[in-house]
Amino acid sequence: MWTIGSGALRTATLCGLGFAIGACSTMANLPPVSQQTLEYYTRQVKGYQNSYPPRRIVVIATVDAREFKEADAVDHAPDAQGNPRIGVVLDRGHQPIQSVYGQPLGPVVQDAFAKAAEEAGMVSFVSNESLDTALKQTNLDYVLQGTLTRCWVRKQRGPDGPYGLTWATSADFIVQVALYKPPFHTPFWHGTSASTYDDPPLSNFFSGPDDDTSIYDEPGQVLSVALTRAVAGTFRRPDLRALVLDDIALHH
């Protein structure tokens, strides 16, 4: 009869119950590269749905002007397929053990703004036309252009817990937004929307591995939350909402 040693039994039990994110899968060495998918989580951010009038807004291509400030982001070149570097996985000594890449960011952010505008109650479209061309359209109320300045995720191994390895992930996303009223080239409104999301909350995680656990398995999911909160947060801003409502009142 085959028997299972206590160590193997304990490992199998942990894998089956999933007590610690990565407790089993990260026992093996991580591959040097991870390809992640970023997406906008529809209706994750609450409190602004259908709060705007149904005006027609087109979202043109997002400008990629990201800044890379961390030491672990020095090598931020895209991979061989042209996918952008969006983050890093670090060991307990803060040394990089995996490079994280995502799909082209411009279309992702552009589509996210269109979805957020639709949630807000507007009639949204996406277009790859230039700003000059979009402002010549006569059937639009607004043209939105985003400039991405920050999009980075860092996943780091933490202290060993009683059930295995622990991980903490932190994501930053910053986008500058300009809203235009055709045919004028001066922005009708502009602002910066930023979001930092920690999974689990760092104040809990570093106080002890038993205090909190991660919600998401993948760094791309954590970065997607930061993206969603920053983009949707644009339409939650009272100053933008009030400006659009006053503008409609004056013209209709």
Image: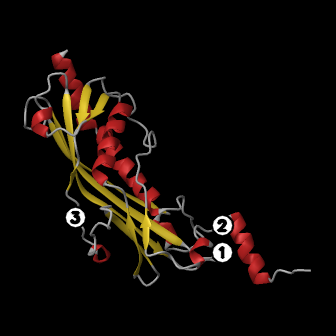
At horizontal 44% and vertical 45% (from top left) the residue drawn is: 41
Please, is residue 240 above or below residue 219 in the view?
above
Residue 18 point in image, percent of width and height: 66, 65
Front-most of residues 77 and 163: 77
**Is there CB contact under 8 Å for labels 2 and 1?**
yes
Q: Circle 2 is placed at which residue position?
A: 19
Whole-angstrom CA distance, mark 2 to mark 1, is 7 Å
Whole-angstrom CA distance, mark 3 to mark 1, is 37 Å
**251 to the left or right of 27:** left
Q: Earlier in the sequence, mark 2 or mark 1?
A: 2
* Residue 163 numbered tag: 1
Residue 102 point in image, percent of width and height: 37, 59
Q: Specify the farthest residue to the right.
A: 1
Looking at the rendering, which quadrant does residue 238 occupy? top left
How has the structure been colored for display? secondary structure
Please, is residue 138 above or below residue 107 in the view?
above
Front-most of residues 54 and 250: 54
Q: Specify the farthest residue to the front.
A: 81
**222 to the left or right of 114:** right
Number of marks in picture: 3
Q: Circle 3 is placed at which residue position?
A: 67
Q: The C terminus appears in which quarter of the rendering?
A: top left
What amino acid is at disc 3? Glu
What amino acid is at disc 2? Phe
**Is there CB contact under 8 Å for labels 3 and 1?**
no
Please, is residue 146 above or below residue 133 in the view?
below
Q: Identify the secondary structure beneath mark 3.
A: loop
Please, is residue 193 above or below residue 184 in the view?
below
Looking at the rendering, which quadrant does residue 244 occupy? top left
At horizontal 32% and vertical 67% (from top left) the residue drawn is: 80
* Residue 1 numbered tag: none
